[in-house]
Amino acid sequence: MESPKLGGRYHVVCRECPVERLVDADDEAVELEREHVAETGHRVAVGRID
């Protein structure tokens, strides 16, 4: 069974460079996080905004 999608927006922030984005979907936030970490090795934080 697939996990339900959460509502709200997500704030994706790199802790080591100026990358910061707001996205509308949890899967988009996770994809952005994974891509940035893979490309740079930086630490990224993702937080849900209500």
Image (cartoon, helix red, strand yellow):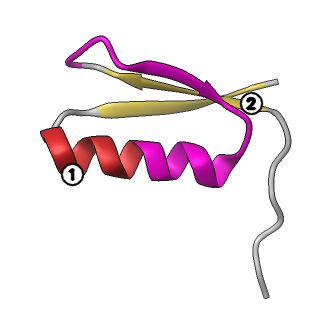
In the image, is residue 41 above or below residue 19?
A: below
Q: Residue 7: within the magenta?
A: no
Residue ID for mark 1: 38
Q: For the point 28% across and 19% down, which residue is it?
A: 15
Q: Position of residue 22 (x, y in %)?
A: 61, 23
Q: Amino acid at mark 1?
A: Ala
Circle nearer the N terminus (2, 1)? 2
Q: For the point 81% across and 58% down, which residue is it?
A: 5
Q: Residues within 10 Å of mark 1 (few under 14, many from 20)?
A: few
Q: Residues within 10 Å of mark 2 (few under 14, many from 20)?
A: some
Q: Position of residue 7 (x, y in %)?
A: 85, 42
Q: Amino acid at mark 2?
A: Arg
Q: Position of residue 2 (x, y in %)?
A: 76, 80
Residue 19 left/right relative to 42: right
In the image, is residue 44 above or below residue 41?
A: above
Residue ID for mark 2: 9
**On the rendered image, what quadrant is the N terminus found in?**
bottom right
Q: Residue furthest top?
A: 18
**On the rendered image, what quadrant is the C terminus found in?**
top right
Q: Which mark is residue 50?
A: none
Q: For the point 81% across and 50% down, which residue is it?
A: 6
Q: What residue range appears in magenta?
A: 16-32
Q: Position of residue 25 (x, y in %)?
A: 71, 45
Q: Quadrant of residue 17?
A: top left
In the image, is residue 28 above or below residue 40?
A: below
Q: What is the C-alpha distance between the residues marked 2 and 1? A: 23 Å
